[in-house]
Image: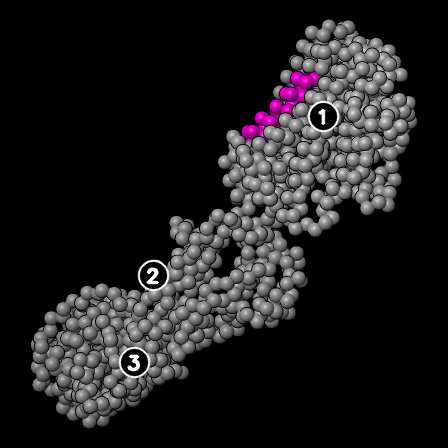
Amino acid sequence: MLRSPNTVPKTKFWFLIGLTFVLHSLLLYRFFQLQVLDYDLYKQRANSNRIRANSVPAPRGLILDRKGKIIVDNYPTYVLFGIGDEIINSTQNFSVISKATGIDTSYLSINYKNNFRSRFLPTKLAKDLTISQLSRLEEYKNDLSGIIYKQYPERIFNSSIRASHVLGYLKELDQEFLSYNKNNSDYQFGDLIGWSGLESKYEYILRGKKGVSYYQVDAYGREAGKIKGQKNISASPGNDIITTLDLELQELLEKELNDIKGAGIVSNPKTGGLLAYVSSPDYPPDLFTGLIATKDWETVITDKDKPLLDRVSNGLYPPGSIYKMIVAVELLERKLVTESWEVFCPGYYEFYDRTFKCWNENGHGNVNLEKAIVESCDVYFYQAIQKVEIDNLSERSKMFHHGKKTNIDLPSEMKGRVPTYNYMNKKYGKWGWSKGALLNISIGQGELLVTPLQVALYTNILATRGETYPLHLVNNKLNKLNKINIRNSTWKLLEKAMRAVIISPKGTGRRADPKIKGLDIFGKTGTAENPHGEPHAWFIGYGLKNDKLISIVIMLENGGHGGEVAAPIARSIFKKYFENDYKIAIK
Amino acid sequence: MLLNIWQKIKNSPTIILIPVFILLLLGLLSLLSIATLQNQSPPNAFSKQLFFLIPSFIMLFVMSVLSKRLIHKYIYVFYVLVVFAVLLPFLGDKVSGTYRWINFGLPFDIQPSEIAKWIIVLVLARYLSDHNLQMTHFSSNLFPLLIALIPTIIVLKQPDLGTAFVMMSSVLPMLYWIGARPFHLFMIVAPILSILSAFNVSVFYFWAFFLAIIIYLSKPKLIYGLGVYFGNIFLGLIFPLVWNSLRPYQQNRVLTYINPEIDPLGAGYHIIQSKTALGSGGLFGKGWGQGTQTHLKFLPVQESDFIVSAIGEELGFIFLLLMILLFFFFIYKILRLAINASDRFSGLILIGLASIFMAHVFINSAMASGLMPVKGLPLPFISYGGSFLVSSFMMVGMILNFGRDDGD
């Protein structure tokens, strides 16, 4: 039974003790290795296990008008995300969201597909959720899995104006853009970037610096509260930009050009600052934010009036008669004609076997240079131009910023076209064109093409005898334009003629005058023939009252006669600006 | 009668209860941290563990005062019963994919293999002490091995690799204790090493060389020597065929043992997360209830298999040092009792029980720290688990009982 004695040698005991000691020491050493020697490695690994960094979007800077009124602001919007890894059944989730918010399920699933990057990252499903949509979503929270929402600052626009071409819009960065801009690590997928207009040009000012918020996640990637001792980096908002735009003038000009195809620019010749900038038709500025219904988008894209085209800086038009002042300067400065040199206008001009018509078929009778500008007589210029060398004229045109970019602070503008000898040879062959082509150019037709923006600069040069600044939308320290070497007598004649355009009984621009005491309006109308239908109607001009000076360019695409349709629009702007002692505070 | 019991308790080596209760407290502390910080309302692991302390203490008492004679007399009967008991789960439904547990209609399941592992110790102790065996003969080792293997193979089939390993862990030390030749014991282990070394060609060559030297130095009869040698080599060669018959999760565990980083989201995930939790605890830990890896559930099976990582993360290396020292002290004390035991039967039982505890401690800690493949073995007195806790305290009771020199 239990009586068999325990006769085990001590060595066996010591051997087993030794074995036990070795095994325990092994464990102890292993713990020491992990917890003390490799502590840093595992601590870091533990943190990367649980810590997630979330970027906090920075509110963009505001866009203000010259008086500090807000044109573009931010407002908080809610964005709905889905986390792929946690969504148990996407169809079921989407139909619940749809039921709660009224957002189409197909819209959700398309967004989910397009924005998807990883099943662990939030995928954007819908933007611009209202508080009431969110509260209804909260009610259905138990039926949802992996659906979260976050607050983002979104652009909101002053309701009184649109100015969509100037302000531009933001674009959400996609993979394509990022792969082109690998070096620019500042931007990440889903960030907003100014994509056109001022938003794009002044991106570096408007864009703030993103912040980072840290939070911890559990083993399933679910958010599990804040991390002790880990400070979030708050986002620093972007800086505001103060534009030269004038909210009220912009509003008025937009109203005047409503439902009309064309462009309108109001600027201050003394500074070069643009007070109003309208390309019509335009699009709602919030077209690119929030939920764009595909329907709306289609409407904008397929509209034959091209609302997306910025006619001010990217529309090319023949200038028509507003070009005549440049021809006049060339004639006088090279002394090709005298101020009193006269031409008889019977309403047409026969040049070899071709007949060139004057716009007034009844003729203007005897016409000198001043009368030719005031009444816009074409026949005078048909004859005078024959004394002009084409390359001299194109040089003179460039002096007035034709065929040159204005370098306005917008991302894109067209250069326009001023024909030269070489250009004509290239286009028509050496013997393919004759002086007859110059006759068309002399009245601002033919190969000449300008943007309304160039015309605005041209008008400012005329208004200040060349002492103006480059056109701009945001106040910058700009240098004056290069001095234009023209005799004072020539400037005087131009001014006299442009004043007569407004006040003489036969002046074409009479309708531009708001008839305010002490206000002198100078101007020129144009009616530019084109192959697309009715002529383009132009009015350029400036108003001077005491120290106040503004210039206006109105161009109506296929609008008809400049004096009849464009000039009255200018009048209402002049009226608004100079009436009631309108305050100016332009730097 | 009562006086007799009091006498027995008074004579028991109760000092071994000190490490046991400290370790128990450490485990409860950790379970409490997990339960409260993760807002688990009762019944949670902590409250269930508290509940299981009642039967545990009762069994501790019963086992410490039970007549050794009675145990000795009926142990063979118990052995037969326990073999049936480990077969019983196969009649019921699978629980968590295995036939480990039986449900008697109680709110918890019972795991008969927990009892079987020390029943084997008792049976072996009686068999080895009753007969005057010629332990220097290799053949004398075979019958004891068979006794242990029968329930072990059934448990292996449940399948429960970890417990099966623990069940076998007591056999070799007991044979060694009673006088088996170390070379013979080596021969018993050799086939397993042959299989393991078959993983890698160069390791296998080294093993073949090492085996040859051991056999040469032990100077057996030529025919035996050659037989053992080529038998082992053959085993290593057919191993790939056996490998394919293993269950995928077992294969995975062995594979990720070789390289845990091989599949960070699969089986290796457990080991990586466990090491991360342990390592990030550092010397002093993150503080009780502050374990991010534990409470954010990066740490898997944190109440039982990986509880040592939960302790390591929150309380740090110093507490693991304390824990290891306590376990060492505990096992040292049992071995001490074994060498001082007045009779062979008691000594053998103490050796067997010490082996079981050692196996649990080593395998659990080694797997949590990434030294061994994941086996799914709990840590005595610390891990959550009803059957295991009761069984552990029964073994402690037996240690008190058989470590007591009362001339019984």
Q: Which amino acid does label 2 sit on?
A: Ile
Q: Mark 3 points at which residue?
A: A554
Per the picture, the main secondary structure of the magenta-coloured stretch is helix
Q: Which of marks 3 and 2 is nearer the N terminus?
A: 2
Whole-percent x, y for residue A225 in the image: 56, 53
Residue pictured at 21% horizontal, 83% vertical:
A543
Q: What residue type is labelled 3?
A: Ile
Nearest to viewer (mark 3 / mark 2): 2
Residue pictured at 32% horizontal, 72% vertical:
A68
Using the image, determine if residue B260 lies above or below residue A286: above
Using the image, determine if residue A496 lies above or below residue B253: below
Q: Report if residue B93 lies within the magenta region.
A: no
Residue B30 in which image quadrant? top right
Q: Name the residue under label 2.
A: A205
Q: Which mark is residue B15?
A: 1
Q: Give the range drawn in magenta.
A: A15-34
Nearest to viewer (mark 1 / mark 2): 1
